[in-house]
Image (tube, rainbow, N blue to C red):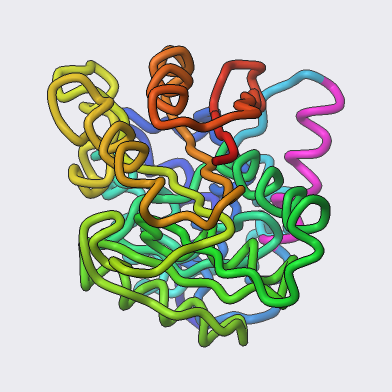
Amino acid sequence: MTGTPIEAVIFDWGGTLTPWHTVDFAEEARVLAAAAVDADEDAHQRLAAAGDVVWGRSRDHHTSATVADLFVEAGLTHDESLLEPAASAAFEALASRRLTGEPLAYLVGTREFHGLSLQVDARVLVPRPDTEVLVDWGIELLRGELAGIAAPEVVDLGTGSGAIALAVSRAQPRCRMTATDVSAAALAVARVNAERLGLSIETACGSWWSAVQGRRFALALSNPPYIAARDDHLEALRAEPLSALTPGTTGLEALLEIIANAPAQLLSDGWLLLEHGFDQADAVRAALQVQGFKRIGMRRDLAGLPRCTGGQL
């Protein structure tokens, strides 16, 4: 059997990403497992498991996990552990793409969100953990104040990969979920995810409420683009769809449009929940008040920053 020792792949990596470069193993384990040993199911499983072990150890002991740690935990650092040339080349190709700033989720093709494994690629924004706060709020309302509605109409405006719509549908299958997006390509990803997960959602193409004009909903959720056009953070996100990140000069354009047209699309006592930038909570609250929303509340993200604001008509 011929091949390249895994140690050589690690040590030849070099350059900007050194052999002992600190990485995020919550995702990096998936990249290495998918790329380096794609044809070896046993090794694939060992690498994935090793990522969990190393990440847990790193967190518990306040140390940094490394690429070498993963291979040690996976038991793939012995002389007899070889990577075939094709696997070695695939590994290095993915490493090179990662160095250009391409999200790890695009490299492996999946991202975990609220317990769901979602297919993602350059057509959609990579789902973020902070958006789970919005999902949890929506589920809380469906289990609480909206529990008396047998089949509540719910809409996810700007669904992208379908993350919000599918997570809410999985938790509350009685709801009639509609997922909208202005991008037909993004909706194709959402439909694939729904089919893979065995969840039933309706999709509609159009800009915000125009995709569902004439309909009324008990609950609307949205994680619209909210980064200002000149924000420095956009450079680090250049591999993701720009239209899913920034709506214009202030970053508030999409949020204000959704809020302004919400009364015509929500049932009496219907709810609107929105994710926004950490410094936009006051502006969103004020806009909701202008449109007659009451019981306006705010939820904080995993870092304790204001991240979601919503209210009831």
Image quadrant assignment for residue 237: top left
Which stretch did the figure color magenta? 47-61
Q: Can residue 91 be seen in this view?
A: no
9 horizontally vs 294: left or right: left
Query: Residue at point 33% right, 43% down?
Result: 258
Where residue 172 sits in the image (x, y, percent)?
A: 73, 68
Q: Can residue 18 be seen in this view?
A: yes
- Relative to residue 249, is residue 139 depicted above or below? below
Q: Position of residue 14 (x, y in %)?
A: 36, 35
Measured from the top left, where is residue 31 in percent x and y?
Answer: 49, 57
Residue 59 belongs to the span the image colors magenta: yes
Looking at the rendering, in which quadrant would you find the C terminus? top right
Whether residue 294 is in magenta: the answer is: no
Say which of 20 and 121 sits in front.
121
Q: Overall secondary structure of the magenta stretch?
A: helix
Percent x, y for residue 95? 35, 49
In which quarter of the view is residue 123 placed?
A: bottom left
